[in-house]
Amino acid sequence: MSASTGPWRNWAGNVTANPAERAAPATVAEVASVVTAAAERGRTVKCVGAGHSFTPAAATDGVLVSLDDLTGIESIVPTRAADGTVDGADVTVWAGTRLHRLGPLLWDLGLAQPNLGDFAEQSLAGAVSTGTHGTGAGFPGLPATVVGLQLVTADGSVLSCTRESHPEVFESARLGLGALGIITKMTVHCVPAFALRAEEQPWTLDAALADLEGFARSADHAEFFWFPHTGNINVKRNTRLPGDAVLAPVSRLRELVSDEFLSNEVYDVVCRAATRRPALTPRINRLTSRALSARTFTDRSYRVFASPRRVRFTEMEYAVPVGCAADVLTDLRAAIDRSGIVTPIPVEVRFSAADDVWLSTAYGRDVCYIAVHQYHAMDHREYFRFAEEIFLAADGRPHWGKMHTRTAADLAPALEHFDDVVAVRDRLDPDRVFANEYTDQVLP
């Protein structure tokens, strides 16, 4: 087990911490040893993956644990549908496995995760624990695919949890913000490998808002990016195809030009220009929204879901009821225009099916995720303040890994099982070994 010290910074650079100690356990026994030793010294413990949360979810001045040495697939159990046909498998994966590594491993086994977000650097446990989701009106987020997990608790005990074994711990920990313990492995339900036909094209915000629910159902996975200060959007529709479909991926040259050069290097220059001369931002956004031309391609699902993201930004995202989403976006557009705030980063609009995960933002209802962003060198505070007011007026729920101002007092009446999760936490971690600034904010 390796250990080190030194400051830590999240991906966006908006959260920093100075842990007293860092640990990189390579076995479950080593994880338990780190936790018990820290508890004996009165130190807190937090686990970190890629640091892609925009909140201080992983920050600590105690012991910062990385599970980068606890990776790979442990076991695979085929599953069957009601008619007896194989419909996928329950795959047990070590918690530190990065999503961009898990995708190819599953593909080689004829499997895939049903849905993914657009950032593949996250660890599996980090993505699940903060409620990462993709888009698709018929597909829930990552936590809903978890069917079992192993958890190291504050006294060093190791619990294996499912709906049948320690069900209340399972329901709390599969989206538990790291507040209940350290997840060392989890079992996720995977489906037969599938390809995606991706169709990307420019469109208008007004056209999307005219029938937003219809747009959400226009493909298996539909989303769009709206460029503030314009009426322009870039639409992405992904349609599922069998895993043996003929692939026609983006050529390497176009990938280098479009996804690497234009979407990252050039875009960062554009954002820096907007930072220096904010008044140019509307013109910049009009040009940017037209720079990416329409394209269609077919590739393995995990390759289509995720895109390279190297332009740094801060982000706030709320899940609002689908039926309210068009009004929310209309109000957001009006508020941006009134405020004089400028941003070169698009607003991202995605969709998700209802699920039964206790702390999920989609618990019990279909939702539209609306994410506002600001370039990391630009002030986000006023923009996010009025955006959050609009989201809350529509009964929105904050994404646990994105910036927000909600507190335990606000969240308790909005989440049906909030008190159940708190009760499990009180039992498993009464001394708050796994507490930090963020859990102090959102949990009592």
Image (tube, rainbow, N blue to C red):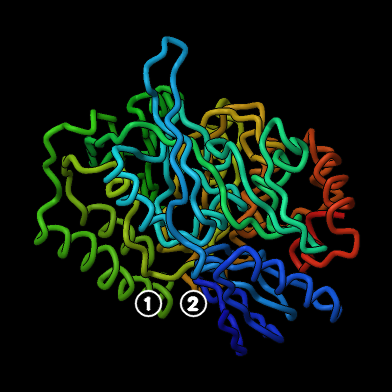
Q: Which mark is residue 377?
A: 2
The local crowd at label 2, few if under 14, some if 14 to 19, many if 20 or more residues have their Cα within 10 Å, is some
Residue 53 on image: x %, y %: 57, 62
Residue drawn 29% across and 38% down? 110
* Circle 1: residue type: Arg
Q: Label 2: state its secondary structure.
A: loop
- Residue 292 position within the rendered picture, expressed as x and y whole percent measured from the top left: 21, 53
Q: Are there few (<14), some (14-19), or many (20+) residues within 10 Å of tag 1? A: some
Element on which disc 1 rests: helix
Question: How far from the left and from the top, in percent, is residue 356?
Answer: 65, 30
Q: Are marks 2 and 1 in contact (CB under 8 Å)?
A: yes
Residue 353 at what x, y percent from top left? 53, 29
Question: In the displayed structure, would residue 420 be above or below residue 183?
Answer: above
Q: At 58% across and 28% down in the image, what residue appears?
A: 354
Q: Nearer the viewer, residue 376 or 141?
A: 141
> Which label number is shown at residue 233?
none
